[in-house]
Amino acid sequence: MVEALTLELDAARQRIRYLETQLERVRSTPNYPHPDHARIDMLGDTDHFFRQLGQHTVCGVYVYDLVAGHNVYVNPRYTELLGYTLADLDALDRDGFIALFHPDDRERVLTHMVEVGERRDDKPVPVEFRFRHKDGAWVWCRSYDVAFERGPNGRMLRFIGSLIDITNVMEAKEARGQFARMAAHDLRAPTRRIRQYVELLTDEVGDELSTDAASLLDAIDQQAGRMHALVSGIRRLTGMVPPADRTFAPLEDLVDQVLEAVPLDLQSRSVHVLRDRLPVLPIYPELVQTLYTNLIANALHYGDPNLVLQFTVARTPDSVVLGLRNNGPPIPDALLETVFVPFRRGRGRSAGPGLGLPICKRVVDCHHGRIWIETEPGHTHVRFTLARSAA
């Protein structure tokens, strides 16, 4: 019995080897379908498969044609979310389609289109904007777009995207911001009053206090000062509303004003300042002053004792990339994703309320730009965009 089973097992093995040889021979033929193609074929006709996918996805899907100036494909979910059929969009010219975006968001959307076209890694690029529904209401959308078709010269002709409705999320965010602004406003007076009381008490009985009592009084004043800085930071972060129009302003003059406002800090650290030739840009000057002030303060706090600050400029065909580079220690990779999040203090140090870089991001957002950090041993470089072109 054992010998019979052994012979049968050997025969089965030979049969398997023969089948494997035949299968490899078939796979090596030029017309053998790729496994991924075979999987789609199992689902039926490829065109039918993708039509069904577009019909039943939960996101609005669209293809935007840069030549036509509007979407040339939308799925049913897009129509459900925004009200427009493909026939509605076909009736619009480029200006009519762009007019459907909220006036405050149009520049952001146009900048986003440029960024999608410049990306070569085929990774979707996100953007948030308000879009006018066919019934007239504004709908907050979050879209993810990627180049769909390029011409012979590599320029993007069409991009494909998907969107979701985030109106409820944005309304809740605005409600939280309103609450934060009200709370910060109400907290300013008590913190200021505490510091005034400490000053009065020090003037009245300061000489009579024991060393421990004087230290406690000084600690109260320091904590009240931190509270005041935190409240002021929250007010700036949540109440930062840009003016109606930008102003063409020379960044050279603006940076001079910022540096003149912090001369003692720079002298006490023997800071060496370098700068590229800064351009004239359409900006909100007061907000950009706040941006540079916070970047300098952040560099003073975390930078090298012999600090070198360099105001940088790099130009691309579609944008001007600004920055502030310092010779401080690098930021750990684990913190790069959180440095622009409020109340996240970098690298374990405890000074400040953790709002400097979040305020910088808010300023950049108001300009519809983007901000990021490049860091390596020996330097940290905060880079940002404020406008698509210079004067």
Image: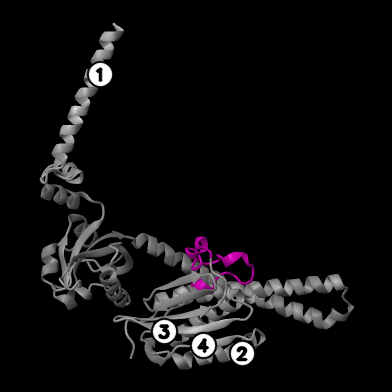
As measured in the structure, the alpha-carbon distance from the residue carrying label 4 to the one carrying label 2 is 15 Å
From the image, give the main secondary structure of the stretch colored magenta: loop
In this figure, which residue is indicated by the disc labeled 2? 263
Q: Outermost residue, top direction?
A: 1
Give the left or right position of residue 247, taking residue 78 as reference. right
Label 1 or label 2, whichever comes before in sequence order: 1
As measured in the structure, the alpha-carbon distance from the residue carrying label 3 to the one carrying label 4 is 12 Å
| x and y percentages locating residue 48 in the rendered image | 11, 48
State the colouring used for the structure image: one colour
Give the left or right position of residue 385, taking residue 71 as reference. right
Quick one: 35 or 239, which is closer to the camera? 35
The kind of residue tagged 1 is Asp
10 Å crowding of disc 3: few (<14), some (14-19), many (20+): some
Secondary structure under the numbered disc 3 in the rendered image: strand
In this figure, which residue is indicated by the disc labeled 3? 313
Label 3 or label 2, whichever comes before in sequence order: 2
| x and y percentages locating residue 169 in the rendered image | 38, 60
Magenta segment, which residues?
332-358
As measured in the structure, the alpha-carbon distance from the residue carrying label 1 to the one carrying label 4 is 80 Å
The kind of residue tagged 4 is Leu
| x and y percentages locating residue 322 in the rendered image | 42, 81
Secondary structure under the numbered disc 4 in the rendered image: strand
Q: Quadrant of the N terminus?
A: top left
- The label on residue 274 is 4
Secondary structure under the numbered disc 2 in the rendered image: helix
As measured in the structure, the alpha-carbon distance from the residue carrying label 3 to the one carrying label 2 is 23 Å
- The label on residue 10 is 1
* Residue 288 sits above or below residue 58 on the image: below
